[in-house]
């Protein structure tokens, strides 16, 4: 069951669309009425009218062969296959996180981008592209010179920022790094008078419990439709 908070934040019902219409307009490529991120930025697209998706998805597929349409189910064009539907919980945070920060959290600037991409693609391959780090600020925790955990910002609107790439190196899980990073990024977003939101696979109960502990609440379910060329 969806919550009543949908009424309060209608832009979040179509986050890719509004991100590309607002803050990330410079990173948008349009195809037959659909909006997509430039393929080097992120493999995501969206629509406001399902009738545009038959042609739009095919056109974008020639730039990005494997991608996701976020939101309602698209009408898949000729030559494309719908590989899967990834159902996520969309969660929002209204108040700052109250948490003890025991680790040094550093901004992953351009000199650290290689470390960032290597860690994210090791744990979550396929989502983090060559220029994804340009979409927002990314932060990390180093242990003995090794980047062991990261979190950053991806979709952005005038009033909202998405927390993304919540990743911990497999050898360093269970130490509270993810919680501290998510709280740090969320509090920074709130300090900008914006609302943090995130998407987490509905099947990932461990991550959902962490976010709930930090104060996030589920707003609605959100589907990521994975399409690719046949």
Image (spheres, helix red, strand yellow):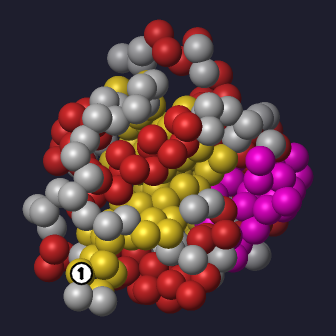
Please provide percent x and percent y for residue 132.
61, 70
Q: Quadrant of the C terminus?
A: bottom right
Residues 220 and 74: in front is 220
| 188 up-or-down from 165: above or below | above
Which residue, given by chain and number where applicable, does mark 1 sit on?
Answer: 143
- The secondary element bearing badge 1 is classed as strand
Please provide percent x and percent y for residue 147.
33, 81
The range drawn in magenta is 23-46
**Residue 56 seen:** no
| 50 up-or-down from 178: above or below | above
Left or right of 100, for residue 60: right
Q: Quadrant of the N terminus?
A: top left
Query: Could you say which quadrant of the image residue 170 lies in?
Result: bottom left
Please provide percent x and percent y for residue 158.
73, 37
Residue displayed at 57% across by 77% down = 109
Q: Is 193 a magenta residue?
A: no
């Amino acid at each position: 069951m969806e919550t009543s908070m949908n009424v309060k934040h209608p832009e979040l019902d179509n986050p890719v669309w509004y991100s590309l219409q607002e803050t990330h307009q410079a990173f948008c490529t349009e195809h037959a009425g659909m909006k997509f991120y430039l393929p080097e930025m992120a493999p995501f697209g969206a629509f406001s009218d399902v009738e545009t998706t038959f042609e739009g998805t095919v056109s974008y597929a020639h730039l990005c062969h494997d991608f996701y349409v976020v939101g309602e189910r698209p009408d898949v064009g000729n030559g494309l296959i719908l590989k899967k539907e990834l159902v996520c919980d969309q969660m929002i945070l209204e108040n700052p996180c109250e948490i003890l920060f025991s680790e040094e959290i550093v901004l992953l600037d351009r000199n650290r981008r290689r470390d960032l991409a290597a860690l994210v693609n090791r744990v979550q391959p396929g989502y983090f592209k060559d220029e994804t780090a340009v979409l927002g600020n990314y932060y990390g925790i180093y242990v003995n010179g090794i980047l062991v955990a990261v979190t950053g910002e991806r979709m952005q609107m005038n009033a909202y920022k998405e927390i993304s790439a919540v990743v911990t190196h497999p050898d360093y899980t269970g130490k509270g790094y993810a919680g501290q990073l998510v709280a740090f990024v969320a509090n920074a977003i709130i300090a900008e008078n914006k609302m943090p939101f995130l998407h987490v696979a509905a099947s990932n109960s461990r991550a959902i419990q962490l976010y709930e502990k930090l104060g996030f609440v589920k707003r609605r379910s959100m589907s990521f439709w994975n399409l690719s060329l046949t």
